Amino acid sequence: MAERIEFTRNYNDLSTNQGFQFEFICDRCGTGYRTRFQANTLGTVSTALGAASNLFGGILGQAANLSEQVRSAAWERAHDSAFTEAMEELRPDFLQCPRCSSWVCKKSCWNERKGLCKGCAPDVAVEMAAAQAAKTTEAVWTSAVASDEDQAQVSSQKAWKEGVRASCPNCNAAIDQGAKFCPECGTKMQVAAFCKECGAKLQPGVKFCPECGHKV
């Protein structure tokens, strides 16, 4: 019975007629290892015969066709041998998780203490550090939002105070804030008072703001 060749899904076959090369990739992090290119002399000879057949045809063409058939079988055998050798070479660098069946690199994605990949058994210290960093970032953004809201409120109050205007009850002329007399007719103004803390209008004679309790 022919020997069976074990294989995995986490590899790419980079082989060509001129030789063999394979790369094996970690299912979790996507990194891995690539074998060195192993030249295949039979493929080189076949390529040379094929080029000669294009030039001369006839006997050389028949020889090239025969060589291609021989090369096909011989190349497959050499390919199988190279593939098996590549797997044996890189097998120590990969482990298969018994829980999720993923092939992961031993260097970065294997939890030695738990005997599982880090996808199934994350590194507790790493997860704690990541959680702390996430909380810190969340706190920073929360603080930044509160700061923006406070600043917007202050700006709004400033704009409100700067934009307060009144009109003369006698001639309806516009009067700037704090004016004691109408600039048009000279009528004395009863200037309205406003809370410096929240901007609420104050009645004459009050000592505390009815809205926020700030002392007038």
Image (cartoon, rainbow, N blue to C red):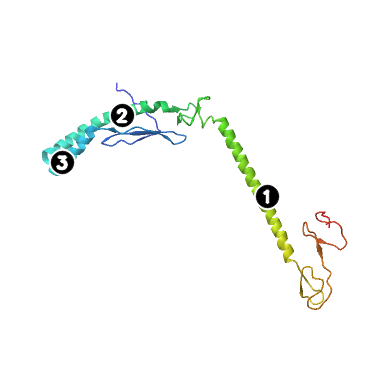
Please state, as top left, top right, bottom left or bottom right, where the C terminus lies in the image: bottom right
Mark 3: secondary structure:
helix
Instruction: Characterize the local packing of mark 1: few (<14), some (14-19) or many (20 or more) Cα atoms within 10 angstroms.
Output: few
Mark 1: secondary structure:
helix
* Disc with the residue nearer the chain's start (2 vs 1): 2
Where does label 1 land, which residue?
146
Q: Amino acid at mark 1?
A: Ala
Q: Amino acid at mark 3?
A: Ser
Where does label 2 land, which residue?
82
Q: Does residue 6 appear anywhere in the picture?
A: no
- Residue at 73 percent across and 59 percent down: it is 157
The single residue placed furthest to the bottom in the displayed view is: 185
Asked if the residue at tag 3 contacts the one at tag 1, i.e. Cβ–Cβ closer than 8 Å, the answer is no
- Residue at 63 percent across and 45 percent down: it is 140
Image coordinates of residue 27 in percent, x first then y, are 45, 34
- Compared with 111, 199 (above or below) is below
Instruction: Characterize the local packing of mark 3: few (<14), some (14-19) or many (20 or more) Cα atoms within 10 angstroms.
Output: some
The reply, left or right, for residue 76 in relation to residue 155 is: left
Q: CA distance from mark 2 to mark 3?
A: 29 Å
Q: CA distance from mark 2 to mark 1?
A: 64 Å
Q: Say which quarter of the image contains residue 165.
A: bottom right
Q: Say which quarter of the image contains residue 204.
A: bottom right
Where does label 3 land, which residue?
53
